[in-house]
Amino acid sequence: MTQKPVVLITGAVSLLGKYLIRELYKSYTLVITAHHISFDIEFRNLVSYIEQTDITKKSEVERIISKYQPRYMVHLASLSNIDYCEKHPHEAYRVNLESVQNIVEMIKNIPVHFIFTSSSMVFSGDNAPYTEADIPHPINVYGKTKSAAEKIIQNLLPDKSTIIRSNTLFGWQPKRARSNDMNYYLNEINNGRPLNLTNRRFFNPLSADTAARIIRRIIDNNSKGIFHIGGNYRITRFEFVKKLIEAFDLKPLTSVHAVPNSFFPAFESRPIDTTLNIEKMTWELRINPPTLLEQLQFFKKEKLS
Ligand SMILES: NC(=O)c1ccc[n+]([C@@H]2O[C@H](COP(=O)([O-])OP(=O)(O)OC[C@H]3O[C@@H](n4cnc5c(N)ncnc54)[C@H](OP(=O)(O)O)[C@@H]3O)[C@@H](O)[C@H]2O)c1
């Protein structure tokens, strides 16, 4: 029997990690790293090995790479909360940039396909929708760390790396993971809290299970270079929540208001329009994302099953 290729996923106890594991486990041997091992890792039985590690500890990461000799490495580990990164820039650079620098140095002479999850936050928001050829111009610390990491990868691993610039992801977060728009707003609505939502900031969010399917296609096809991933629409958070209410058949007890951006002081560090052009993803990877309603309804069904 031939052995399944090894995929090493860092930061796997995360929204994207959870769906990626489900997408890959049948065809690949999965080794995952978790920052804080928790005994309720839901998908423990789908992975072959779990290593607890701090991604900033170079010798630890070196040990894991040399122990498992992965064919693919999907680097999800990151500090991704924009406000946290703004307040803790040194930590953000250490986790999001220095760890990438270390990994790239470690693997540049071995046959590993490195897949890096970057973000639409590498763009300023002034010139959307953005294609893969557009020049990044980040306006917040998180975007700056991702953009700087991209440059290192492009310089040192030009022929064996893929940079995925993702728009906002949504889905059922695993226990202990960061919340996301779907989880958060469902919770607020179910608890009867009024919602004030911008109708002046634009994005094309994507379900985490569709994102996982795209990464699987990248691995299966050995696709290299930059890919923008997101939904086939340009919406605001107000419109997202309206669709969420429709998909989950909710009857909010309190109001859902559209408000201007000035309502939210933290918006200073957020680009106005992070919509990504997804033509390359559609044509080269042959993935057409479902409509937003279909993506949200998938999660409603998943919860019921
Ligand atoms: N979710 C989105 O909307 C979105 C959009 C664009 C790009 N991305 C990128 O896609 C990737 C996955 O995103 P996600 O939202 O699913 O996950 P996430 O919330 O960004 O979490 C990533 C993982 O990184 C781990 N981590 C943080 N610091 C670490 C450290 N020092 N050592 C080891 N691990 C560490 C976290 O573990 P702990 O929680 O235990 O610390 C977590 O498991 C990230 O790179 C993110 O930047 C996400």
Image: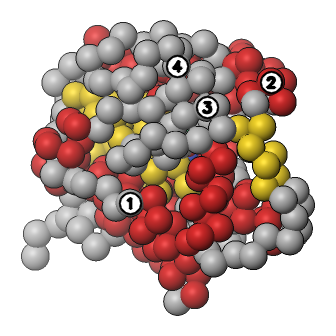
Residue 45 placement (x, y as % from top left): 48, 77
Where is 213 relative to 78, above or below? below
| Left or right of 205, for residue 20 | left
Judged from the image, the quadrant occupied by ligand 1 is top right
Q: Are marks 4 and 1 in contact (CB under 8 Å)?
A: no
Q: Which mark is residue 201?
A: 3
Earlier in the chain: of badge 2 and badge 3, it is: 3
Residue 212 placement (x, y as % from top left): 37, 56
Which residue is denoted by mark 1 in the rendering?
291
The answer to whether the residue bearing label 2 lies less than 8 angstroms from the nearest atom of ligand 1 is: no
Earlier in the chain: of badge 4 and badge 3, it is: 4
| Left or right of 205, for residue 200 | right
Residue 29: quadrant of the picture: bottom left
Q: Give the residue type that dot 1 points to.
A: Thr
Residue under the image location 34 percent in, 20 percent down? 153
Label 3 neighbour load within 10 Å: few <14, some 14-19, many 20+: many
